[in-house]
Structure formats: structure tokens, C-alpha cells
Image (tube, helix red, strand yellow):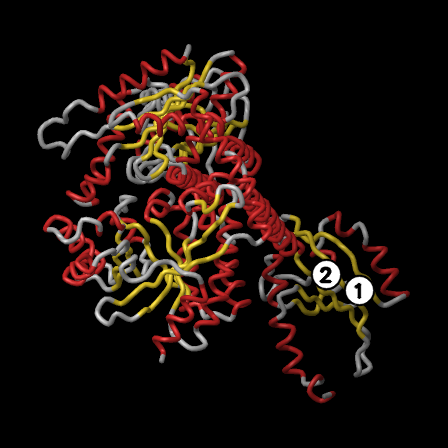
Amino acid sequence: MAGFVDDPQILRAILELSPDLIVVSEFSGRVVYVNPAGRRLVGLAESPERELFTADFFTPAGLSISDEVEDNLRSRGYWRGRSELQHFHTRAPIAVTVTTFVVERSDGQPSVIATIVRDRRRGDERDRRLREVADAAAQFGAEQKAVAELSRLALEAELPHLLTAATAAAVTLVGVETAMVTRVRESDNTRLSLEAVTGPRGDGFDVPAGNHSLMGYTLSTADVVVCSDRLAETRFPTEVMKSYGLRSGVGIPIAGATAPWGALSVHSADARNYADRDITFLQTVADVLSAAIRRIELDRQVRQRSMHDPLTDLPNRALAYACIDEALERADAADTHVAVLLLDVDDFKLINDSLGHEAGDLALVRFAQRLRTAVREQDVVARLGGDEFLILCEEVRDIAEAQQIAHSITELLGAPYAHGSAPTPLSASIGVAVSEPGSSRRELIHRADLAMYRAKDMGAGGHAVYDDDDVYDAERIRSLSIDLRSALERGDLTLHYQPLVEIESGRIVAVEALARWNHPVHGPVSPVEFVAVAERTGLATDLGTWALAEACAQAARWREFTTVSIRVNVSALQLRDPAFPRVVSRVLAATGLEASALGLEITETVWVSDTARVAGTLTELHDMGVSLLLDDLGRGHSSIYYLDRYPVFECFKIDKSFIADLPGARPEAIVSAIVGLARAFDVTVVGEGVETAEQLEALRACGADYAQGYHLGRPSAAEDVTATLRSAVV
């Protein structure tokens, strides 16, 4: 290693290639060597014309510390500090850092002084660049923090708050006096509206749209517009900028669905060259605003869809109920009345039966359009589901005015349609209820419902106003509901089972569980009545859960010796409960019944009236492997659209009203059409209410798969069905 360092050639190369000035001098100050970098630094020729001394290299200021340097060299042999050289030609000072030290020679010759000089300007330039990098990093970090905060607000905050935060960030990080968000006014497309502003120039904002301002030009071109100095601007008039005392600015379009939603702009009172970094930051902010606006619009559309009927675009049940609640509050405060009109389309089933569901849907759309024109502008028209509609009328003086509204609706609904525009006009039975001080929405709708059923008794197209005589039915419902709750608690209800038979083989493939109630006072209560009572008083879920558990337990015992499956009816309240699939799963686990052996029957009326709310529940049940049957097909006016969109049903059960008229050309044509529809959806068909051999044969001819009815077996107790099933096995 020592030999390598002592190599003169290597040491000379180090001196010659060093970027720092290196001088070797005698103690007298005479310079004996200057390396190339040093000569370049001070402008010294390779062969100076005269002998040089170290003092020649320094300015007077640099020489002022020569005594200090000499003392340190003599006492310590070393000195380091700052000094100042001078250029030999320009005499310009050069700030340097000097390191000088005594070098003892190995050949016995007098010692020399070696001086290494580093140009401080290189360090200053490096420091400047480092400061620039640090400043840029700090600016970038601040911009990213601002964008992150705006992105958070875009998900959580209201739009005005977000827009104001965006303009504040633009003012701070671009370093301008004013930032604003503008857009074309919705009410007057010749002017711009000021949506948000940070800075002193928002008062009295009045700017024309179009190419008359920086913001208008930005919106017209849908592009970034940079105006460094309005005095040199030729693309658009600058009078608006001048009137607000502005000299420069940048406009960034905020993207909308098909055209700019608005513009984000920054403004300065001074001429200014805006950096690319500023433009990029403003574009990022505009992108965040655009995304937030799209989210808000999407939320609005989702709310619109969730609160409106998809077929007629009328408010749905949820929105109608909310409107009634608000109207009742206003009525109580203003001492006025609210009228609720419930409408049920008369004989709508005939439209579906004779012309099909698409024609029925079209008729409902036209019916809804007529309702809109029949009421006052401020009234709310809603579709509750199926063929049931509701009208909310505020500021009704009295019952007579409500009756007049109902009469006007009846008259307009009965007018003939223009030729070819619809199959037939529809009439409706209308129940009217007028609020009293303190009336609740539930009470008002219940009264209108009672009045509507009285209107139906009067014939098609009638209307009736609620009166106290309608309360009789309500009292019986209340009494039965109390007794039904007690019966459920005591276990007084039973299940009977009716067979479902495969038409071709005559084999029992399933049994339907049917609840029975023998009232201790009234005797046997019709299932139609007590099930309706359960649904209207909140007992439907308890009744349904009991029936499901009881039926599954019995089916599990039967499946020890047969493959028969069980069918259980499900209420609307059960289907609306998101937890219902978990209830079914727990019952199956507790009873040991496999999911494929359970079929749940959902009436068409429930399906049609609440498709959006129950479709998710039905899909979850279908995915569990539970069979789903659409019961009473033909009574609820199913939309083919919904059946196609939610392919969850495995079987259609034709309503018994269609079977009653079999055999016969017209009823057979209707049943055959339903069978054809079922085949299109790849589902099986059951004919309900079969009471004669002729009806069974007609069903066979129409292509139905299964049949059910008194001709094939009446509902029986579990022990009787057990005996029947065992005999079939033998």
C-alpha cells in the first residue's frame, strides 16, 4: 500500500484531476505549483509571465487574515477558514474555503506549504438547488394534503362546503388573492352564477356567460385557459377583469356528464406567469369537484329511483308516507285539513287476463298520467303497488271539497282515450278520509282504506268518504287480534295439510301446510279472516314463524319414509324482514329438513306490490336451495319485466278462479297461455282449486304439471296425511 501511495505518477494525477485549487508554496510565499483547476478558477495562464506569490491570489480582504494564517502555520502547521480570491484578469472576487498546512519533505529540503481552495459558489448553488427541491417538496406535500382533504369532503360534505374549501385551497397554494367556482345559471343561461368564492371580489358578482370573461371562455371552450396579463389577452374581452381590478388568472373546467358543470378559476391583481405546477394542482382540484358532483347526481338518481315507482315514475309508498307525515305537521300548525284518497283500479285483472300483462302495464301508465292531470298542481299522486294508488291533498277546507276532488277524478278517469292510445279507460274505487287535529298518517290511511272498500260495494267507479260506521270492522279486527295473540302463546293453532299431486302419475309430491284456528267462543275462524287480522295487526311474522317451524318438523318426520316435500305460505311482513332467510335457515337446522324439501309460497299480490323490497330476500332464499312458488297467479297483475329480472321462482300456481270455469274454450285458452308463460321462464305449473275430474282433465290437456284441490284431497290433520303417505309407500 505504501509503495502505491508513494508512486509520483499517481500523486501527480490526483493533483492534476482534483476539482479544487491546489497550490504549493515556500514559506517565503513564492508559488512553486498550481494545479489546472486552480489556474482555471483564477484565470491564470499555464506559464505565467512572472514569478507568483500567494499574496497575488487574494483580494485585500482575503489578505487581511494573512497574519492569522502565518501564526497558525508556525505554531500548529495547519489553518482552515474562509477567504476571498481574485480573478487575475477581471479582478472579480471569488468566495472560497481555504485549507493550508505545512508539508515536511522526505529529501531533507526545506518544508513547503500546501493550500487547498474550494470555490464556495459551488456550494451556494448546490444549497440553492436543495432549497428549491425542499420548497417544491413542501409545496407538493401541501397540495397533496389539500387534495386528500378535499377528497374526504367530496365523500362526506355538502357541495357548497366542498366548493368553498376548494377555493380556499386554491388561494393558499397558488398564491393568489381570489378563487371562485362559477357556472351558467339554470334560470338564465346568459349569466354566470357564483357558487363559491374565497377572496375580496365576490360581492356584487354579475358576469355574462359566453366568451365575455375568463370563466365564460373556459366554459365555452371546455379547456384550460391561462391569462398571464389581460393587457395582452386577445381571445376574449377583458372588461370584466378590469372592472374587478384583476390583471391575470387561470380558468379550469369542472367536467360534467356531457359538458362542463362549471369552472374553477383563480385571479390576481398582478400580471403573472402561472407555473405548470399551479395548473396541474388546479386541474386535480377540479377533478375532485367533478367526481363529487357526479356522486351527488348519482345519489340523487338513486334516491329518485328508490322513492319512485319504476313503471309509472310516481312517488312510491315510502315517499307518499313521508309526504303525508309532513303535510299533517303543516296542517296542524296552520289549522287546515289534509285529505287522503286511496284508489283501487276496478276489474284490472280483466285487462291482464284478456290482453296480457304488458297491456296491463301500459294501462297503468296511462291511468297514472290521467291521475296527474285530474288533481291540483300541489297534490301528490303516488302508486302504492299493484293497482293501488294514493292522492294527498293539502289545504282542504272540508269533507265537501274532498268529495268534489274525488268526483272530478272519477269523471276524468271515465273519459274515453284518444283512438289507439290505450286499450280502454280504467275506473277506480276511491276511499276518502279528511284529517282532524292530531290525526296520524296510519289513522288517516286506515280510514281511507275502510272507505275504499265501502266504495267498492257501491260498484265500479264509486267513491266514499269515511264515517264512523266503518269502525265496526276495525273493532272485530281488534278483538280477534287479541285472541289470536293468546292462541299463538297457548299453542291453540294447528296445521292441516293438503296434497299436491303430479297430474300424469297421480303421485303426491308435496303437501301444503294450512293454519287452522278453532276459537273458543266463535268456533272455527276462516283462515282468510285470521290471516288478514294477523297481517293488519303485526302478528303475521309470529304466525308465519310458528307455521314454518311446525310444518318443517312434520315434513322431516315424513321424509324418513317418503320423498314428499312441504309447502308453507309466507306473508308480506315476513318477506320484508331482511332477517327472514336466517329464520328459515335456523328452522331447517333445528328440524333437520334439507332446504330442497321446503317450498315457500308467495302470493302474486305481495310480489307485485313490493317487488323492490322483497326481491333481495327471495334471491337469498333461492340461493339457499329453498323452492319458491308464485301463488295465486293472475290476481296480482305480475309484470313480465319483474319476473324476468328476478328469476327466483320454480313454480307458478294458477289462481283457482281460472280453474273454476274449466272446462271451456275461454278458460282453457287462459290457462294454456299461463302454462306457455311458465315454459318461457322454465318453471312448472300448479292448478289450484281442482274440484272435479273434468277440471283435472282440462288441466292435463292445457299442459299443467301439478294439481291441488278437493277433488284430489282436502286439508287434513297430520296423522291422516301420514297414513295416506305410508299407504302410498306400501
- Residue 106, compared with residue 70, is above or below; it is below
Viewer-proximal residue among 91 and 627: 627
Instruction: Report the residue marked by disc 1.
Output: 28
Give the vertical position of 108 relative to 51 (above or below): below
Which amino acid type corresponds to the residue marked 2 in the rendered image?
Phe
Q: Give the residue furthest to the right.
A: 75
Q: Earlier in the sequence, mark 1 or mark 2?
A: 1
Residue 307: percent from the left, percent from the top?
40, 36
Residue 276 figure quarter: top left
> Hey, what amino acid is under mark 1?
Ser
Query: Exactly how many numbered labels are in the figure?
Result: 2
Q: Are marks 1 and 2 in contact (CB under 8 Å)?
A: yes
Q: Secondary structure at mark 2?
A: loop
State the residue at coordinates (72%, 61%).
53
At label 2, counting other C-alpha atoms closer than 10 Å, the crowd grade (few under 14, some 14-19, many 20 or more) is: some
Q: Distance of mark 1 from mark 2, alpha carbons?
A: 8 Å
